[in-house]
Structures are given as structure tokens and as C-alpha cells.
Image (cartoon, helix red, strand yellow):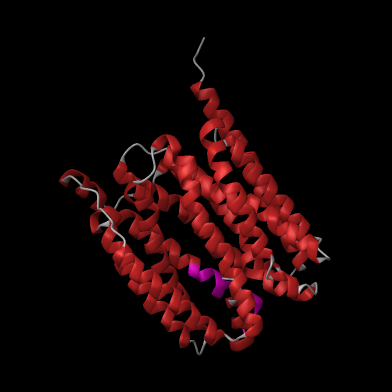
Amino acid sequence: MVIIAVIAQKQLHTTLGQAGLASGIYIIGTLLARLFIGKKLEVIGRKAVLRFGALFYLITTIAYLYIPVIPMLYLVRLLNGFAYGSISTATNAIVTAYIPKSRYGEGINYYGLSTSLAAAIGPFIGMLLLNYTNFKFIVFFSIALVLLTTIACFVFPVKNILLTEETKQAINKWTFDSFIEKKVIFIAFLAFLMGLSYSSVLAFLSSYVKIIHLVEISSLFFVVYALIITATRPLSGKIFDSLGEKFVMYPSYIFLTLGLILLSFTTSGWELLVSGGLIGLGYGTFMSNGQAVSLKQITSSHRIGVALSTYFIGLDLGLGVGPFILGELRSFFSFQQVYLIAAILPIVCLVLYKVSLHKNTAKQQPLT
């Protein structure tokens, strides 16, 4: 995610907007997978989706070795994203079988820690390897990781849930409800805005640090992000379960805004690293706890896949279209101004969340 925009500009001589699309189209592929696989997951079977998705992910990762022109890069990124979306949709549903409903916040946060750490360590390794090796080496390194993942997916024991014929028929219908869980639409929309905001970091940090002359220390940005998530994730899950979702959701919006504002004014290494910590507290906290909020809305086990895919469709859509939208804004604004624009979005989320929470509380109060 963080190096592909640089590669597109350097090797394929694209514009920043085209490079942003090359970064974000991966997430569009992930979104399409969540939409389709989320609907069909329990019919196809969790085990089959996990294993064949991993094989497809391996094949499409190998395809990065052949990207002579930008349309080919777009295609490879789209298919690679679809493969990742298939696997993650399966694993998101599989993990819920191990978590008691009363501890969804804590359990999802522990599980989310693995994906959040990967999302932090991956960019760190990517930026480090980009400085000291070349793109081909990075692709081979990725192939090795995906190969290990594929082997693990075939070894890991997975149980499919049993469906009645009536449930199968309901899933196979091509209706809005079969693709989207209505109860999760609101939190999915907030996830879209948060993903859109955070995409400014994923897609353009490597270009931004060159302008502010902080390339050497920039690789530590995601290390700090990862350390903060590791330290706070288990606690935020316990707070979610014991005190309620608002005690983790409100801080997530505020921290992401503060992190992006600081990033826009960064002139020194310590400021860059502090912004990474604040962004980790913001986006990292929201990502897992938003997933837990989604699960709280669901009562039927066969709807878990659809509910989680609905949530991640919002998140992925924001991450996917964000690099292109913000890349085009870069034509009119400086990087600093783009980050300030991105910082507004979590505040919008905070206001919408507060309004929604107030309405739900009013509905639950008994009439006198």
C-alpha cells in the first residue's frame, strides 16, 4: 500500500492521481470480494473460501513480477485485493466462533491486534526495503510470506456452519438484504469516512516525508503506530465490554484528528513519530471496535459474514477511493493542507456518532 504509489510514479511515470489509484484499487478489489464472498461465505463454506482464497492470493502476488504498463498494474492490484478480501472475510467470520458474545470487544481486539500489527509492520518493512533494495526483491519477499500463509490455511482446522435449506435459499436470493446487513450500515458509513481519512497516510506518507526531509526516520512511523496499538488494544477491548462502546469510539475520532493535524505541521522527527502514535490510537482503535459494534447488532450466526463484510465494505471503500480523491486534491493543495482536510473527517464521524447515540438512547427510554 505505501510503496506502490512511489513505484508507479518512478517505474511507470504516472501522475500522483494515477499512482493513488494504483494504491487504492487494491482496496476496491477487497471491497468487491467482501460484497460477493460475504453473501456466499456460508454456502461455499468457510474452509473452501479460506484455502482457495489463499491460493489465488499467492498467484496474484506472483503476478506483480509482470507489470509493464499501468493498466496491467491496475488489474494485478484489483485481483490481488479480491483475493485478500476473500481470505479476510473468511477469517473474520471464523474467529467469532472462538469468542463468547459477552466478550466480543476484548476478543475482537485481540484478533484485530494481529491485523493491525501487520498493517503497521508491513509498511515499515516496505519503506525500509524500498530504501535499500528494489521492487523485485520486495515482490519475492511478499511471495515467500504469502506461501507460508497459504500452507497455514490448509493446515488450520476450520468448521463450516450447517445451514437449513430455507437459510440457503434466503442467502442465494439476489436481494439487498442478502448482500448488506442494514443494522450495520451506519457504522459502515463511519468506517468509510475513517478509512478515507487514514488513506492519506497509507498512500502519501512516503512522498510527503521526502518533501519535509524526514525520509530516514519515516520508517519508524509505523513502528510507533504498531507499538501504540499493541499497548492499548487489549485495554480498549475490556473498556468496550465493561463501560460501553462510546468510551472507545469517541477517543478514536479525536486521536485520529489530532494525529493528522500534527502530521500536517510536522517539521521534526519526534513530531512525525508522535503523530504516528496518535494516528494508531485513533484509526487502530476504531478499526477493531467498529467490528465489535457490528457484531453486537447481529443475533443470527449465518448473518455474521454479511454483517462483517458490510462493515469492511465501508472501511475498504474509504481506503480504496481515498488515495485517488486525495491525490486529485493534491493538484490544488499542498500535502499539509490535504492532511488538514483529512483531519476534518473524524470530527464529522464524532458528530454523526453522537447524534445517532442520542437518538438510540431516546428510543430506549420508557414513555411516562
Which residue shows up at 57% across the image and 48% down it? 233
Q: Is residue 55 left or right of residue 225?
A: left
On screen, residue 330 above or below 278: below
Position in image of residue 66 (x %, y %): 46, 88
Confirm whether residue 331 shows in the render.
no
Q: Is residue 112 left or right of residue 55?
A: right
**Furthest-bottom residue in this view:** 68
Question: Main structural element of the magenta stretch: helix, strand or loop?
Answer: helix
Which residue shows up at 65% across the image and 63% down it? 223
Which residue shows up at 21% across the image and 49% down it? 168
236, 290: nearer the viewer:
236
On screen, residue 102 above or below 272: above
Confirm whether residue 105 shows in the render.
yes
Tell me which segment is drawn in magenta. 13-26
Position in image of residue 65 (x %, y %): 47, 87
Position in image of residue 239 (x %, y %): 57, 36
